[in-house]
Amino acid sequence: MAIPRPAPEHRKWWAIGIVGVLLMSALAVWWGVSASKGLSWDNGPFKVIDDRSVQVTFYVNNQDGKPVRCTLEAQDISHSRVGVLTVDLPAHDFDTTEYTRTIPTVSKAVTGIVDQCSYR
């Protein structure tokens, strides 16, 4: 049994479709790989020190030997921001680096998180 071939007038559209699918597949792979690299961070444990401070441990991934600036945030029970601390971190070549900082607050916090990090 022979595999049917597209009619001659449809071959051009089949070729365009195949090339389009290959290009979109390559784009999807590139996007997936690029999204998994670069600077990222993870929240670690936190400890409420008192009504005016919370200690936050966090992990910065893929610093690539560059200094980083992170903004830490303390939140109260209603998720309102009660403290913010911007920290400048030294350059590191490690895959993951652990940091601990204390955020001053205006009232009692119930959590401390990393809001964002970026290369300086």
Image (cartoon, grey):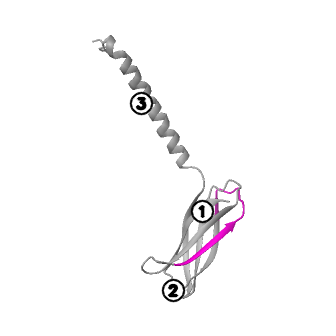
Quarter of the image where one finds residue 57? bottom right
Q: Percent x, y for residue 39? A: 60, 55
> In 3D space, how far apart are the residues under numbered discs 1 and 3 (Cα atoms)?
36 Å
Residue 117's tag is: 1
Q: Decide which of tag 2 and tag 3 comes sooner along the chain.
A: 3
User: Which residue has dot 2 on it?
Assistant: 108
Cα separation, mark 2 vs mark 1, equals 24 Å
Disc 2 residue crowd, few under 14, some 14–19, many 20+, Cα 10 Å: many
Provide the residue designation for mark 3. Answer: 21
The amino acid type, in three-letter code, at marker 3 is Val
Residue 8 at what x, y percent from top left? 33, 11
Which residue is at 71% across, 59% downward? 92
What range of the chain is rendered magenta? 82-97
What kind of element bears circle 3?
Answer: helix
Say which quarter of the image contains residue 58: bottom right
Query: How busy is the neighbourhood of tag 3: few (under 14 within 10 Å), some, or many (20 plus)?
Result: few
